[in-house]
Image (cartoon, helix red, strand yellow):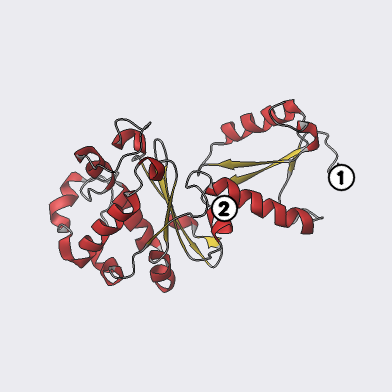
Amino acid sequence: DRLMSAPSSRRVIVVHPPLMSRDWECAISQSFWDLGVPAIVFLCSLHTPPLALGWKRGMIVHVGRNEAYCLAHADGTPIDNTLQIAACGYKAAVSDPENTTSSWTNQMKDVWINESNPNSLILATAKCLQSCPIDVRKDVGSNLVFCGPATIIVPDLPNKVIDRLQKLLKGDAPELDEITSDLTVFPTNWEVLAPMHDVLTARSTGPFQPDMVSWIGASLWATVWHRHDEDDEHIKWIYAPQADPTS
């Protein structure tokens, strides 16, 4: 009753986090088959926000409960080799996630904007930028779109990250010798990114909520192609066993 429609009459889009396991995909698929859904398609949550926001070059910085993801896009296509995943979700940074806060604690600073922390959000963002092709790097850096529930709990998170990044690129970054002994991952080359200090810009997901923009992008994508994709060339539907594709 809550669905307000019969599952057997609707195809379903599943918006999932990056690197979803095959076992989890199979379990999700089976749960929909059991409900009678005729077909489903899987879309990565980092691929769909540009469709809702109407841009082609930029970076999605999604800060969720346990992890943060950074992925650059260029000319309407995600640049998969730029993907960064860091264990810096709001659960590790905020003691009371039920309440929105504008007060920054030392815990937030360490988890999100401490460049000496190899799992910090600021390092993930910088490494994503560093992985971009040089010819699109400035366009990506000028359109850093922060989304996910953490940006609702801590609204000024994007500005804090940008402010610290700009200071680092202007020369406030530690020397490599000072930090490599404590890291198990290759450190960010701040000198390579230095020319970008004056173009870095945080963008909002307005008019959409930060935790809904992936779903809205997927809905718009499906709405457009459902009308113009009779041969299933753009939407790669996965049909239920023995389901009729024409239903």
Tell me, for residue 48, which label it has, or none: 2
Q: Identify the residue at horizontal 42%, vertical 40% (top origin).
A: 64
On the image, which quarter does residue 95 sit in? top left
Residue 241: x and y in percent read 79, 33
Indicate the secondary structure of the residue bearing disc 1: loop
On-image quarter of the C terminus = top right
| Residue 44 seen from this side | no
Of badges 2 and 1, the one in the foreground is: 2
Seen in the image, is 78 located left or right of residue 97? right
Q: From the top left corner, tell me how far across and down residue 36 is, in percent.
A: 77, 29
Question: Where residue 85 sits: x, y (%)?
Answer: 39, 46
x and y percent of residue 17 in the render? 51, 42
Of residues 119 and 94, the one nearer the viewer is: 94
Left or right: 7 as drawn, with respect to 55: right
Measured in 3D between alpha carbons, the distance from the residue under mark 2 to the one under mark 1, in whole angstroms, is: 26 Å
Q: Residues within 10 Å of mark 2 (few under 14, many from 20)?
A: many
What residue lies at 53% left-to-right and 65% top-to-bottom? Answer: 56
Which mark, residue 246? 1
In this rendering, position of residue 187 left or right of residue 172: right
At x 62%, y 29%, the residue is: 27
Q: The residue tagged with tag 2: helix, strand or loop?
A: loop
Q: Quadrant of residue 192?
A: bottom left
Quarter of the view holding residue 182: top left
Residue 180 lies left or right of residue 159; in this view the side is left
57 shown above or below 210: below
Answer above or below: position of 159 versus 74.
above
Q: Image quadrant for the N terminus?
A: top right
Three-letter amino acid code at disc 2?
Answer: Thr
Q: Earlier in the sequence, mark 2 or mark 1?
A: 2
